[in-house]
Amino acid sequence: MADYKQYVNLLLDEEKYGIDIMDIEEILRMIEITKVPKAPSFVEGIINIRGKVIPIVDLRKKMGIIANEYTNSTRIIVVNLKGKQVGLIVDHVEEVLRVEDGLVDKAPAASTSVDNAYIKGVARLQTGMVIIFDIHQIFGSGEANALDMF
């Protein structure tokens, strides 16, 4: 019997990406974000969810993709990074994918416009390829320290 993992399939600039469902706490519709002065360029600001302040990162900016206007499809994916909640703004959340472990390959060098350090692998599906993010590698130590100020 094959082992499976589940990934939330999301879009950034029409490219498909996945985040391990075990790293996700919740998915929110876009809400008003409070700007924070002198925050890193990829930090859009903060939100208050049930009395907890969460920093919000525009995943497009963090990945070096040109920022876009938010739409009705824009979502905030709240993830847990080393015990800290962080919200990631994405263009669209499509579905939960159930992927057999054998269908996830290591990412080839220079496979996308995204830094390979952030990529866990590439899932080969009947509907196409999905780049799987390693969200624990997205923020360098300096960036993680900057997020700790929130």
Image: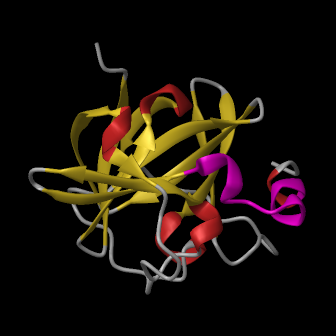
Magenta region, residue range: 134-145
- Viewer-side residue, 89 vs 15: 15
Point 53% across, 78% down: residue: 109
Estimate the x, y position of residue 9 in percent, counting from the top left.
29, 47
- Viewer-side residue, 106 vs 56: 106
Side of 63 where 53 appears, left or right: right
Instruction: Single out the residue that lies furthest toward the bottom.
Output: 66
Let me know if residue 143 is in the magenta part.
yes
Side of 68 where 95 appears, left or right: left
Instruction: Single out the residue that lies furthest toward the top.
Output: 1
Estimate the x, y position of residue 107 in percent, counting from the top left.
47, 64
Let me know if residue 115 is in the magenta part.
no
Residue 43 image-quadrant placement:
bottom right
Estimate the x, y position of residue 64 in percent, counting from the top left.
54, 82
- Viewer-side residue, 73 vs 23: 23
Residue 20 makes an appearance in the image: yes
Q: How is colour applied across the structure in the image?
A: secondary structure
Estimate the x, y position of residue 119 in percent, counting from the top left.
54, 60
